[in-house]
Amino acid sequence: MLKVGLTGGIGSGKTAVSDLFKSLAIDVIDTDVIAHELINTDHQVSQKIVEAFGEGIIAANGVIDRKKLATLVFENKTNKKKLENILHPEIRREVNHQINKLGSQKIPPAYIIIVIPLLFETDFHYLIDNVLVVSADEETRVARVKQRDSRSEDDIRAIIAHQVDDTVRRNAADHIIYNNGSIAELAPQINDLHAKYLQLTKT
């Protein structure tokens, strides 16, 4: 079972890409989704986060305000490391659980997609066999995030500046998707990669 690590910077279109793979009946494990579920539903994890960052990150509805938490983490490397130390072991455990579950099926999938936004900033490399990078021009990425998250342009560009440069991602990639256009323009690239991955599993 080939494990493809899907990564890319903020606004590059990772969700659009993973959704297109899902439409081809490919299993997708998304570490962002796992992190959100851990923060929202795992009491032990959420309690550790509150102990580390204070009750000020709890929203009026009693759950952790992820935007407040993100701001604290983004502005401070020590806070970032604190959160990673809490979340990453749990995320890796869940990813491995899902991989094992898929691999133990009577007919395992030929390949799976594992979405790891911070693949090059973290130690998740050992989980994957093949790196797929989604790349887009910075202006396109800024416009997408502004529309999606209602963040200011300065905030978005600051996030981009703190992430690994796209050149680093592309140099480490086994395959690259260029996503500056529409879903209609993106889909043929996914179809081509789908065929390549199926062929790789036969060699």
Image (cartoon, grey):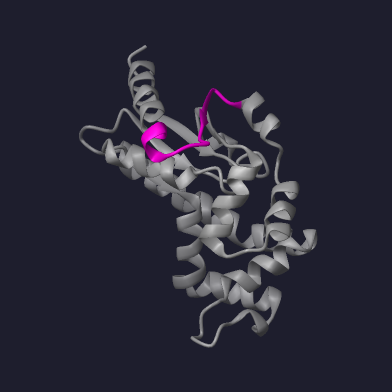
As drawn, is 116 to the left or to the right of 69?
Answer: left
Q: Nearer the viewer, residue 79 or 139?
A: 139
Based on the picture, tell me whether residue 121 belongs to the magenta stretch. no
Picture coordinates of residue 172, whole percent (x, y): 63, 26
Q: Which residues are magenta?
A: 173-186
- Determine the residue located farthest toward the bottom in the rendered image: 60
The quadrant in which the N terminus is found is top left
- Determine the residue located farthest toward the left in the rendered image: 106
The quarter of the displayed image where residue 145 is located = bottom right
Based on the picture, tell me whether residue 178 belongs to the magenta stretch. yes
Q: Residue at x 41, y 32 (%)?
A: 185
Q: Residue at x 31, y 27 (%)?
A: 110
Picture coordinates of residue 74, whole percent (x, y): 72, 61
Q: Residue at x 58, y 40 (%)?
A: 8
Q: Nearer the viewer, residue 89 or 71?
A: 71
The quadrant in which the C terminus is found is top left
Q: Nearer the viewer, residue 94 or 175?
A: 175
As drawn, is 160 to the left or to the right of 22?
Answer: right
